[in-house]
Amino acid sequence: MEFLLNKSKAGKSVNVIQELLKLTNSIISQMMLSMRCSGSGNSADGVRTLVREVTEIFGEFNISDIIWFCKNWDLQGFRKRFEDIHRRYDALLERIIRDREEVRKSKKKGRNECDQGENVDEDILTAATDTTAIALEWALAELINHPEVLKIAQEEIDQVVGKSRLVEESDSPRLQYIHAIIKETFRLHPPIPMISRKSAIGRDPKVWADPLEFQPERFLISDEVDNNSGPIDVRGLHYQLLPFGTGRRGCPGASLAMQELPTSLAAMIQCFDWKPAATSKTGDGVDMSERPGLTAPRAKDLECFPVARFTPTLFET
Ligand code: HEM
């Protein structure tokens, strides 16, 4: 928020996804490695770049996977690229582990008895970073394109949080409209569309009224399919909305993501209005094309000018 405030004061634009990736990467890195990745520097930049490369190559079309007699050929150079990514990821994680071991050795014996063994998981770093940032970027893009929805969301925040402090995680249960915005974003833009067993269900007209419209209100009422089952949730019990998959291979990070997303989005729109830069504009709003990959990010990064709307006392100078 402070970074955005400084950009706002300087009248400068931000590449939204780049900053969100720093945030989500920093959260998971701090949880797993006690290491912040919000700035730049070898490890921080390295992790973010590699996460993007992994999710991109995962979704690309590989002829050798489809046509059996091509299976031993690397016609498009995927194997070479994959091996290169894997080698660099491995080297980066090895370096992080080594650094952590050095730090541990240099600390006084006894102080670190609670340290668990090094357990750096490439999958979790990848799964936790891109998905959450992409969901936030899509949510913001939808809000820019739907100012009436943004207005209701900002009113909800002002009502729940008041006008003197920054929104906090503990406010989240009372931000029901923000939760509805997150669900509607998941419905139209599931961050991992290919692994969900029925990838197009979020836009299926048999399941959703006006499926292509962004209408968070649909989540404030009972389940549209079965009116007795209460509001639709995202954790795998309502099969018409499965952003985290379901069952025993469902996403283990769903609860973490559902803690991060509403608070981060709420803070972003509590403190700022977002004016798209010329490069992100089409007509009245922002371009909403996707690009393929394991995750489904926007085709073009969203570039915006944050315009300060409310400055929590915390950041006042
Ligand atoms: C908006 C955020 C996220 C979305 C939309 C998402 C979505 C998904 C989906 C669809 C799957 C596959 C489920 C299946 O195969 O049926 C998955 C798997 C997984 N996710 Fe997430 N995820 C998110 C955030 C996270 C976070 C924050 C973490 C880690 C803290 C995480 C860790 C994982 C892991 C480790 C798997 C593999 C589970 C397995 O194969 O058993 N995800 N996620």
Image (cartoon, rainbow, N blue to C red):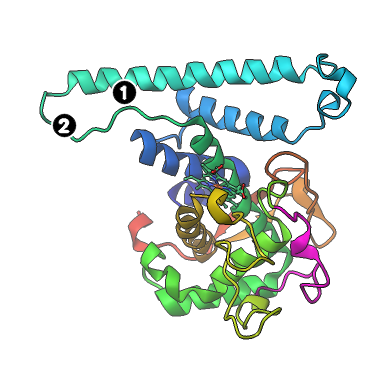
In the rendered image, the vertical position of residue 72 relative to residue 199, given as above or below: above
Q: Is residue 217 left or right of residue 202?
A: left
Going by the numbered disc 1, the residue's amino acid type is: Arg
Foreground pick, 134 / 300? 134
In the rendered image, the vertical position of residue 81 relative to residue 312, given as above or below: above
| Disc 2, SS | loop
Whole-Å distance between the Cαs marked 1 and 2?
14 Å
Q: In this view, does 106 lie to the left or right of 210?
A: left
Magenta stretch, overall SS: loop
| Disc 1, SS | helix
Give the numbered dot on residue 113: 2
Looking at the rendering, in which quadrant would you find the C terminus? bottom left
Foreground pick, 100 / 36? 100
Give the numbered dot on residue 100: 1
Q: Pointer 1: residues within 10 angstroms few (<14), some, or many (20+)?
A: some
Going by the numbered disc 2, the residue's amino acid type is: Glu
Name the quadrant containing residue 54: top right
Foreground pick, 311 / 193? 193
Spot occupied by residue 58 in the image (x, y as percentages of width and height): 70, 33
- Is residue 203 highlighted in magenta? yes
Number of the front mark, 1 or 2:
2
Name the quadrant containing residue 294: top right
The magenta segment = 197-216
